[in-house]
Amino acid sequence: MFLGTYEPKLDEKGRVILPAKFRDELSTGLVLTRGQERCIYVFSAREFEQMNEKIRQAPVTSKQARDYMRVFLSGASAETPDKQHRITVPATLRSYAGLGRDLTVIGAGSRVEIWDATAWQTYLAEQEAAFAETAEEVIPGLF
């Protein structure tokens, strides 16, 4: 499970060093793809394969499912960390997420998310107030 918040830098070649706590699970391979809210999702190869199986079960007759699958999978890039635990974020994904040099990398349970640091701070500021004021059950059975 991926947890926590980290603030690595993107180097001039578009590489980022994976946080130490994420390295074991991602060391044998990972997949980067477009995420919601203009971030990049990072899945272990195993988790991505499980997601792909669920995607394959979506009805081909559903336009919304086809659209989602196309955007999600067309942006996917399989990567293997180098010996310094760096991964290259493809230019198309860097552009999609508006990544600058300063990043925020968060653990989001089954995945990692890579955000431009300013975009993350804006998102978090907007969401923290709503989070603190949540009075109803958002995730069934959690509380």
Image (cartoon, helix red, strand yellow):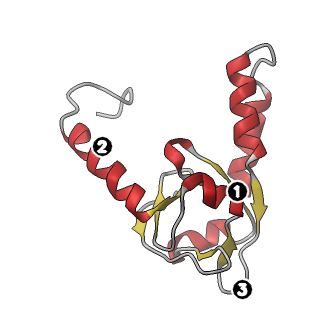
In front: mark 2 or mark 3?
Answer: 2
Q: Residue 26 appears at what percent x and percent y?
A: 66, 66
| Left or right, 66 with reference to 122 | right
**The quadrant where residue 52 appears:** top right
In front: mark 1 or mark 3?
Answer: 1
- Specify the farthest residue to the bottom: 84
| Left or right, 32 with reference to 130 | right
Q: Which mark is residue 127?
A: 2
From the viewer's side, name the closer residue of 62 and 20: 62
Q: Which mark is residue 83?
A: 3
Quadrant where the C terminus sits is top left
| Left or right, 61 with reference to 36 | right
From the viewer's side, name the closer residue of 110 and 16: 16
Q: Which residue sits at x=53%, y=47%?
A: 38
Query: What residue type is disc 2 on?
Result: Gln
Whether residue 82 is visible to the viewer of this picture, yes or no, is: yes
CA gap between label 1 and label 2 equals: 27 Å
From the viewer's side, name the closer residue of 5 and 21: 5
Q: Which residue sits at x=68%, y=79%?
A: 13
